Structures are given as structure tokens and as C-alpha cells.
Amino acid sequence: MTVRAALAQGLDSAAGLGRKVRGTARNLTLQPLAPYSAAAIRIGLGGLYLIHLLRESVRADHLWGPGSPFTAELFDQTLKSRGWDGAFSWWYSLLVTDSALVFWAWYALAVVVSALLMLGWRTRATAVLFWFLVVAFYIRGSMANSGWALLSLLFANYLVFVASGRYWSLDARRRARKAQGTPSATSKFVFWGAETEELRRRLVTVLHNGGMAMIALQVMVIYGSAAMYKIQGESWRNGTALYYSMMYDDFSTFPELSAWIVSHGTFAALMAYITVFSQMLFPALVFNRRLKYCILVIMLATHVGVGVLMALPMFSAITIVGDLVFLPTTFWLAATRLVRTARAAPEKKREASAVPSPREPADAEVGSSA
């Protein structure tokens, strides 16, 4: 091959790569990524936070309210020591009050907003208000927060930018009814033309794709960093980490079951190695079409095991919600068809049983003539 031919081939390859990059960039401004996954994340996050608030309502006063040992004076000192006493200190101190009425009013608002986010009512505004309240609760309970609280805060941040109300929401139902009725009216703003609407749509798509990309990146960072920390420990390298963690009283939901699992040393060591390698390889395998579902099933089994056996249900649930970002639209469409088929099967059986047999009229005539 001559130098000129090699140069021409290189230029053609660069041009093809440039076209692919431009096409991908164009698609990112026109095509929203994983809209069904965004809806599932919205439902999961709002539902889990609603469950969290309802579950902790009996202890809410001691966790975030006036009865908390983390008094207003200690809270102010903490804000100053962390450099949080700036322009947003009023936001961080939202729940710091001596009035039980004010605290429970904010608490009730958080419950309502979580429910509305889960249902998908005015999703854009509700997501912002949900994020606002989640930050306030997280800062107020900063001395007793867990991994669940941190992940819910991070996902709430990203959900603000995501168009999560396009499916499985009250907003989607309202838009469908409006589309079936009168045609959509033009905007009341004079300057709002077709070009402005196209710009708005593309901006919304870019923000949505950026938010979904950040959720995916956050999940990969969590798994990658967890694997890196694990392999630094001697117990994870020799396979005894699950033994010590499951025999710890504070992380043992079913002591007998935990004791039975750790009594089989080979099985416990194998589970420890699978946990480490699945977390380490997750960022690479999750983008492979053939191995995507395998690694997601392994992570699902891991989270279920942690939630059931180690008394960490909320942490396991929020990590499962984060994993939903990697499920493609084809998966959700297939799951939707499967659910509709399962729901329609009993109705078809009832209709079939209600229809009389074709031989019944003939039998009736024979009986009457006799």
C-alpha cells in the first residue's frame, strides 16, 4: 500500500468516525434515552421515600424534629464547621425548629410530595419540590444517615433533569385524554413559535439524557468503588468476609439462616468472590447486549440477599432502583405486554364461562318437544 493510499484510507476512516459522532450527538438531542426506565426510577424513588417517611413517623421527632438530640445549637455549629452557613443555610435549617406543628407540617408535605412523585402528578414541579425536601431531611439527619439516605439524595438530584413523567404517570394519562379530545391549543405567548418549541424540546431531551447518564455513571461508580475497597481487605481476598458480616448481630435478620449459610464455607467464599467480581466488572458487562441481563440478575440477587439476610432493605431497594437505568425500552415494552396478557387471561376465562355452549339450545328444544 502506497503512502497516498494509506493517507486516503485514514481520511475515510476519520470521516466515517466524524459522521458517527455527529449522528450520535444529533440523536442525543432528538431521542430521549430510556424513558420507561426513567418512569420506573421515579416510581421507585418516590415510593421508597414514602415508605421511609411512613415507617419512621413514630421516630420522626427524635430523628429530625424538636426532640432530636442533634439540637439547634449543635446543628448551627455543624453548619459552621462544614462551611454550610452561607446563602443556603435557611434551606439546610428548614427542619430545625422548636415548634412541633411546623415540623409535622413539613413532614406531611414531604409525605404528600413523595406520593405525588410516585404517581407522576405535575412531575416537573413535583420532582423539584421532592429534591428540595430530600436535601432538607438529609442535612437535618446528617449524624444518623445511611447509604440509603445518600443514594436517595443523589438520585433525587438527577431526577430533577429527567423527563420521568412521560409514561406510567398521571401526567401521561392527562396528555392522552387531551390528545383524544380537542387538538392542542397554541401557546398564549406571542413569541412562542415552531422554532422556539423545537428548541425547548431539544433542550428537554438533552437535560433528560444528561440526567439519565449521570444516574448510570453514579451506579457504575458505586459498584466500581465498592469493588476496589473490597479487594483491599484481607477477608474479601480469602473469602471469609461474608462469614464475619453475616454473623454480626446488628446485620442478621435471620440468625439461623445466616448460620446455615456460613456453615458451608465453600459456598460462602464463592458468594464473596462473585460479589467482588460482579461489582468490578459491572461497568464493562452492563453495556454488552448478551451479558447485560446476566450481570443485572446477579446484582439483583446480591441486593435481595443483602436486604433479606443483613437487615438492609432500603439500601438494597434503592440500589435496585438505580440498576433500572440500564434496562432498555424493549425490555419494558415486553414486560408491559406480559402484564397485560396476564391481566386479560382471567377476564377471557370468565367471558368464556359466561357464554352458553352451542348444544344447550338444541337440548332445550328436545326437552320441550318431549
Image: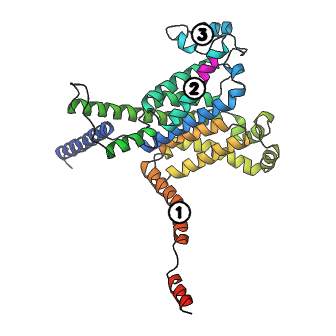
Magenta stretch: residue 355 in it?
no
Residue 166 visible to an observer of this rendering: no
Start and end of the magenta stretch?
A: 103-110
Q: What residue type is labelled 1?
A: Glu
Are dots 2 and 1 in contact, CB under 8 Å?
A: no
The residue pinned by badge 1 equals: 347
Q: Which amino acid does label 3 sit on?
A: Leu
Q: Where is residue 44 in the image (x, y as percent from the top left)?
A: 55, 39
Which label sits in the foreground, 3 or 1?
A: 1
Disc on res. 110: 2
How would you rate the neighbour count of disc 2 (Cα within 10 Å): few for under 14, some for 14-19, many for 20 or more? many
Q: Indicate which disc, 3 or 2, sits on the residue closer to the N terminus.
A: 3
Q: Indicate which disc, 2 or 1, sits on the residue closer to the N terminus.
A: 2
The residue pinned by badge 3 equals: 79
In terms of depth relative to the viewer, which is nearer, 292 or 143? 143
Q: Give me the C-alpha separation between circle 3 and circle 2.
A: 23 Å
In terms of depth relative to the viewer, which is nearer, 233 or 137? 137
Q: Give me the C-alpha separation between circle 3 and circle 1.
A: 59 Å
How would you rate the neighbour count of disc 1 (Cα within 10 Å): few for under 14, some for 14-19, many for 20 or more? few
Are dots 3 and 1 in contact, CB under 8 Å?
A: no
How would you rate the neighbour count of disc 3 (Cα within 10 Å): few for under 14, some for 14-19, many for 20 or more? some
Q: Quadrant of residue 14?
A: top left
Q: Where is residue 195 in the image (x, y as percent from the top left)?
A: 21, 31
User: What's the residue at 81%, 43% (across, down)?
Assistant: 255
User: What's the residue at 63%, 35% (across, down)?
Assistant: 51
User: What's the residue at 55%, 31% (across, down)?
Assistant: 114
Q: Main secondary structure of the magenta part?
A: helix
